[in-house]
Image: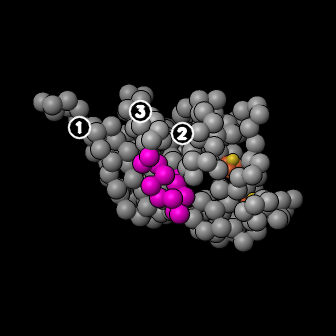
Amino acid sequence: MGTGADTARPVLGLAAGEPVPLVPGRSCAGCTLCCKLLRIPELDKPQGKWCSHCDPKRGCKTYETRPQSCREFFCGYLTSHNLSDIWAPIKSRILLMGVEGGLSAVVDRDRPDAWRVSPYYEQIKAWSRQGMDEGWFVIVRIDRRTIAVLPDRDVDLGEMEQGEGIEVGWYPTDGGMAYEARKVARE
Ligand code: SF4
Ligand code: SF4
């Protein structure tokens, strides 16, 4: 199982790269976390650094002319009925999004252990087990650092470069299933 093109399927109601309706009653009000955590290619903005157009307390200062990738992005909290209010990024400091191959939990570099605390870690681990059954996987990203969350352990893959993907596999052992994850060059 890898990050191949056939894996861009909805996970937890999150469709990678496809617009989905917002959950009624949820909005970005008070939150600007994606303006810090995500790479914005049109602005040459890297992951983990505040966008120069963002006022973290008030929002986008260039909202009417923001880039297309900003217009099209809605995080998992806004789009998935499967996520409870604890997953509001402003509280959790974790931004969930569907990606090719599965689910990405993008974590605020200033709270890099936010995903390891309860109840987030237990839920992320449960998604990992569910994903292995259904054919998708879970990664945690802290800027470019990427951690594959497997049912039996977490594999720190280090910093991912453009053009690299992740391959996750499993095999039976005498003690049950074993899992592995590694970086691969995309074709
Ligand atoms: S992280 Fe989600 S809730 Fe927060 S501003 Fe971005 S899209 Fe809105
Ligand atoms: S342009 Fe606006 S919406 Fe886009 S990342 Fe910057 S502050 Fe956020």
Instruction: Where is residue 103? Give x, y as percent.
Output: 50, 42
Where 165 sits versus 2, above or below? below
Residue 103 falls left or right of residue 137: right
The first of marks 2 and 1 along the sequence is 2
The residue lying furthest to the right in this view is: 64
The image shows residue 132 at horizontal and vertical percentages of 37, 33
- Ligand 2's quadrant is bottom right
Residue at x-position 41% and y-position 33%: 126
Q: Earlier in the sequence, mark 1 or mark 3?
A: 3
Circle 1 sits on which residue? 178
Q: Is residue 28 left or right of residue 12?
A: right
Q: In the figure, 178 relative to 145: above or below?
A: above
Q: Residue at x 65, y 67 (%)?
A: 50
Residue 35 coordinates in the image, percent (x, y): 68, 60
Residue at point 53%, 63% (across, down): 110
Q: CA distance from mark 1 to mark 3?
A: 16 Å
- Which quarter of the figure has residue 97? top right
The image's mark for residue 8 is: 2
Q: Which residues are magenta?
A: 106-117
For numbered disc 3, what is the local secondary structure? helix
Residue type at tag 2: Ala
Mark 3 or mark 2, which is nearer the start of the sequence?
Answer: 2
Q: Secondary structure at mark 1?
A: strand
Give percent across and percent down for residue 33. 65, 56
Task: Return the residue at label 3.
Answer: 126
